[in-house]
Amino acid sequence: MDTATFPTPGEAAPAAETIRLQATSGFSRVLSPRELWRYRDLAFQIAARDVTVRYRQTALGAAWAILQPVGFMIVFSLFFGRVAGVASDGLPYALFSLAALVPWTYFANTLLLGSESLVSNSALVAKIYFPRIFMPAGVLAAGFVDLGVSLVILFAIVLIYGIVPSAAVLMLPALVLIMVAAGLGVTAGLSAVNVRYRDVRYVIPFAIQMWLFATPVAYPSSLIDEPWRTLTAINPMVGVVEGFRWATLGTADAPLALIGISAASALVLLVAGLAYFDRVERSFADYI
Amino acid sequence: MSDVAIQTTGLGKSYELGLSRRGYGTLRESLVETAKGSLGKLTRRGRGGEEGDTLWALQDLSLTIKRGEVVGLIGHNGAGKSTLLKILSRIVEPTVGYADVSGRTGSLLEVGTGFHPELTGRENVFLNGAILGMRRAEIRARFDEIVAFAEIERFLDTPVKRYSSGMSVRLAFAVAAHLEPEILLVDEVLAVGDAAFQRKSLGKMNEVAEAGRTVIFVSHNLAILQALCERGVLLERGRLLADAPVTEAIDSYLRTLEKAADVDLLERTDRDSRGYDESLIRRVQIEDSAGGHPDTVVAGRSATIAIEVTEALPMTECRLTIHNSLGHPVATFDSEVSAPNDVRDPELGPRIECSLDSLQLLPGRYRIDVVLKGKRQIQDGLQAACFFDVEPGVLQERPTPISGADGDVVLPHVWRLPA
């Protein structure tokens, strides 16, 4: 490790340690748990700030967390469910799409805000040292509030439809974990690229739309023939979305293959995103 | 070993010009650059050009700062002071060399950086404290003290965006001043708030300095540096020029300033980085009505400060600040604050004149800083664009005090005394 740290011999000053600041190469900071732990209070404050600021001075406040997925559910039900008559695995189409829209909305918002997180905090990044990964990670953490609210609504609607979720509901935390891993990997990578190339800003909204169509949110993945159906799970949101339907709506077949492949893919994205972030983190202040 | 707080060895930082100055590029530019680069390698050309584009903001700096020392960093714009602070606070990495920093470091860089306008004063204290490296428990323990210092008790639960600029600056300084790191880096933050708050901040800084903590100050206010620091480190173009007791370092700095004013102003590189450079300051001179030696003026006479620029831009404006020999500002003239007697003369050419009815300065040596604006943008700025001496004179038939008088200005006045 390049930033060598060692304690000074017993002196009056408590916990004084010498840090050598020098040019580093390769991996250095993000994956150092010690460094992250040292700045844990800041991580908490940044996430708390993101939550507080999100809905301050908005008329509807946290209702926005519900309006977005529910709005999409209504539009999808009308156009895909009614007009186009897209299949919905024998479920009411509204429920079918809402169960997918809840995780998807979290993921899409995270991508949108997370990829801008370093640039929109450029004053901080240019002036103060802290593990920069807290910026995209803070966005993911702050999104949990919205996700929690919309999950409550989802379950309320599920119960209204008279469906009692099976034990599969216990898989939800694992599915959220897959989504967070993929989200952190992608936003870390994109936010870092955004520091150098503001092109990212223009690509993101477009990419999110494409990603939505590539994910079985408005349609069931059973429309796709094998072996392609299983292959699409390389997109981690495929496993997450189908998993959410299974876990919340109590559908019979567990899409375990899809979830497994998506989990592996999310892990790859996470490692790749963090590795890239870690390599370029040291030059953020020079370019931002 | 253990009484050393900071040790730098051969420290250097370089920037690639073009990329760092413009801030960011687009992917396309970068692809083009990469293509050009590989083409250049193929044809073995363009090597000299690449090296010419590197700017060394800091070069070969070796310094040892002991625990408890209070050091002032002195130098022109672009001398490398801020770069050194950025390296020490871990914001940027050095290109070569290394710095060993022993102890918790806190920076008091620009005030208010970590504030969020939508959050209340209370929320911002915690956020900003965390950003500056304080633990939650620490902030909670010192919360009342911070709020009392900032004098904002009544507005604690008001969003900071509704604060006056004075209030938010006071709050930001209060949070930062209650940091208790072993090494404190302070960048030009003392000139905030009103006079009373400035005195309070200065007192707080004095306290910090006397509490045996290691402090590195950057300030253009030499009087403050002289009051707070023992040791002065003078940087010029990224290199160490002097490392001496603070008075000596300040003297060397003033000498380099005068030398800089001697060279053709167009050749100076320490210009205001915000400038658009469509028009540059070519020459600055002050002359009194007797028309004697330029840059030597007699107190009490009328005088004219003339600024020659390279281009007469539309909406040219100019701000002059006169500083005394310690770098303390004495007077500011700003053409944007206009009066009916101001004239816009199409015949004048690329030249600006500022006339004073009577030069009410005490004898001594002064300098003029110039900021040039045009087309509603800052075009250029130079510190110490001109030095001048004020000779003793007569103001309303009363001789100016010759020497040893306090202050910088002399005002016309009349006494009534018992016979």
Image: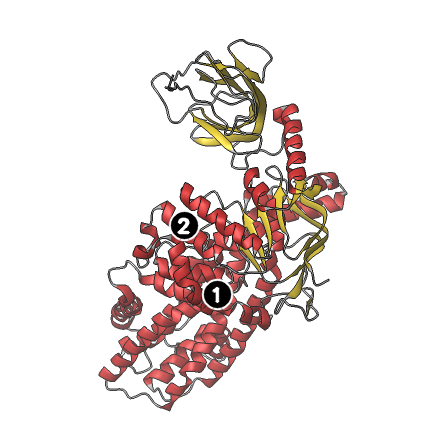
Same-subunit check for callouts 2 and 1? no
The quadrant where residue B264 appears: top right
Q: Residue at x 45, y 66 (%)?
A: A138
Residue, disc 1: A42
Give the x, y percent position of residue B145.
41, 60
Give the x, y percent position of residue B18.
60, 41
From where the camera sits, is residue A65 visible?
Answer: yes
Q: Which mark is residue B229?
A: none
Quarter the N terminus of chain B occupies: bottom right
How packed is label 1: few (under 14 Cα within 10 Å), some, or many (20 or more)?
many
- Give me the chain letter of mark 2: B
- Give me the chain letter of mark 1: A
Point out the residue furthest to the front here. Answer: B419
From where the camera sits, is residue A27 visible?
Answer: no
How packed is label 2: few (under 14 Cα within 10 Å), some, or many (20 or more)?
many
Q: Are marks 2 and 1 in contact (CB under 8 Å)?
A: no
- Amino acid marked by disc 2: Arg
Residue, disc 2: B170
